[in-house]
Image: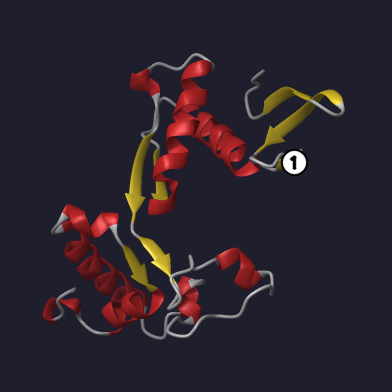
Amino acid sequence: MLGDEHAIVQAVCLHHGPYEVVIAPDGGGYLDLATLYRNLVKELVAGADRDRLSVMVKGGDWVFGSTRVDNALIAIGLTAGQLPTRLFCPQVVTDTGAKLSKSLIRDGQASLPAGSAPWMLDTRMWPGSLSEYADRLLEMAAIFLSDPRHFFRSYSAGELGRLMSQSTRSVTTP
């Protein structure tokens, strides 16, 4: 069942019988697939405002999970034309290839990996000016947008740091 800002998931556990969980953007129930359900609710809420174009920006790791969210949105009555617009960005990884996890670092469960910098988790910590940050970000985006293949690969935090630390007009990506 679906409310304005929540979903009620009803299921049957083979060991414990029927149960119901309320999933809402501000917290609530827990399911093993909570991230999928949370995204379902967020995308429904964002899409409810027909006076704005909502664009979901997601990491490349969400490409396949979004198919499940789309299937759920269609199952509750949305048409293909009502599905949210999504922009998938390159995955940011550590030097070991693991996803750079902001939440684990913020929660103290992991340390800032080699090659990454505090501003990658909190842009207010950028060592230069705001206009310099915006310029560097736009230059890097121009490189990524120059070839769609850039969006189907991962970038290490160290490589992004390198691209952002110097003017990318003189930098080429491998």
Nearer to the camera, 141 or 160: 160
Point out the image quarter for the N terminus.
Answer: top right
When asked about the image quadrant of residue 156, the answer is bottom left
Does residue 2 appear to the left or right of 136 in the view shown?
right
Is residue 168 depicted above or below 51 in this figure?
Answer: below
Nearer to the camera, 4 or 143: 143
Q: Residue at x 62, y 24 (%)?
A: 4
Is residue 121 depicted above or below 69 in this figure?
Answer: below
Q: Which residue is mark 1?
A: 30
Q: How is the image coloured?
A: secondary structure
Residue 157: horizontal and vertical position, in percent? 40, 75
When asked about the image quadrant of residue 94, the answer is bottom left
Q: Across the whole image, how many numbered discs are drawn on residues?
A: 1
Does residue 40 appear to the left or right of 171 in the view shown?
right
Outermost right residue: 16
Please, what secondary structure does the residue beneath circle 1 have?
loop
Q: Residue at x 43, y 69 (%)?
A: 93
Nearer to the camera, 41 or 156: 156
Q: Residue at x 40, y 66 (%)?
A: 92
Is residue 81 depicted above or below 106 in this figure?
Answer: above
When asked about the image quadrant of residue 97, the answer is bottom left
Residue 102: horizontal and vertical position, in percent? 55, 67
Specify the amino acid type for callout 1: Tyr
How many C-alpha atoms fall within 10 Å of the one at disc 1: few (<14), some, or many (≥20)?
Answer: few
Residue 110: horizontal and vertical position, in percent? 63, 75
Q: Residue at x 51, y 71 (%)?
A: 121
Is residue 30 depicted above or below 120 in this figure?
Answer: above
Residue 82: horizontal and vertical position, in percent? 38, 22
Point out the image quarter for the C terminus.
Answer: bottom left
Outermost front residue: 14
